[in-house]
Amino acid sequence: MTNYRFLYKFMCLILASLLISGCGFKLRGSADVPESSRLVTLILKSGTPASFEQALRRTLYQQGIALLETAPYQLAIKQVKENRRSITLDRKANVDEYELLMLVKFEVLNTEGESISGPLVARIERIYDYDADAATASYTLEKEIRSEMWQSLSERVVRQFVAQTH
């Protein structure tokens, strides 16, 4: 009796796997990168935040895009801006909410260094609550939000790169 249950569960698992793979299901963040876009030279402007650089390199690696000095395309990061500003205040004039804004200006270049995309921009903003009574927790929350934003921004840059080189 237990052998049949195991066999039944195993067959259900196999069937579910086949159905999911057959319907075109893909994990979030994964994209179809054409073979022509799988090699890129990364050119970073000096002063690029290390958090963004790490997120961008991680995203390129996850998408199967290799970094090479002599690649057919160059991804040139021209400017990275980060801004935090207060949005609302409570009745004691303490900050209640902050807005984080991150912006990346970049171009896709060919092997001769000529732009094939023109100037491109990826931008993300997020508003979060700040609690002055729990400053450490708010700082930790902001740090996590910044990390997620850098990752999301790098995914946008890579998607635009793939679209330009496709």
Image (tube, grey):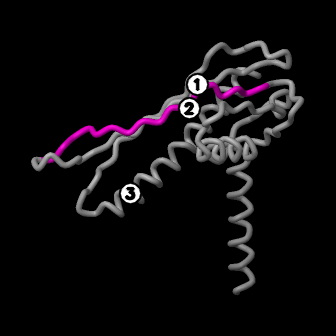
Q: Which residue is drawn at the image coordinates 29% and 52% (left, top)? A: 130
Q: Which residue is drawn at the image coordinates 56% and 23% (left, top)? A: 121
**Residue type for callout 2:** Val
Residue tagged by mark 2?
Answer: 80
Q: Check whether the beta carbons of the residues at disc 1 and disc 2 lie within 8 A of each other.
A: yes
Q: Residues within 10 Å of mark 3 (few under 14, many from 20)?
A: some
**Residue type for callout 1:** Lys
Mark 1, secondary structure of its residue: strand
Q: Tag 3 or tag 1, which sits nearer the N-term?
A: 1
Residue 90 x %, y %: 15, 47
Residue tagged by mark 1?
Answer: 105
The CA span between labels 1 and 3 is 27 Å
Q: Tag 2 or tag 1, which sits nearer the N-term?
A: 2
- Quadrant including the N terminus: bottom right
Residue 106, compared with residue 17, is above or below; it is above
Mark 3, secondary structure of its residue: helix
Residue farthest bottom in this picture: 1
Residue tagged by mark 3?
Answer: 139
Which of the pair 15/153 is nearer the observer?
A: 153
Residue farthest right in this picture: 70
**Most common secondary structure along the magenta stretch:** strand
Q: Check whether the beta carbons of the residues at disc 1 and disc 3 lie within 8 A of each other.
A: no
Q: Which residue is drawn at the image coordinates 73% and 41% (left, top)? A: 60
Which of the pair 156/16 is nearer the observer?
A: 156
Residue 43 x %, y %: 73, 30
Q: Is residue 151 left or right of residue 161?
A: left
**Residue type for callout 3:** Tyr
Residue 41 x %, y %: 80, 31
Q: Tag 3 or tag 2, which sits nearer the N-term?
A: 2
Q: Residues within 10 Å of mark 1 (few under 14, many from 20)?
A: some
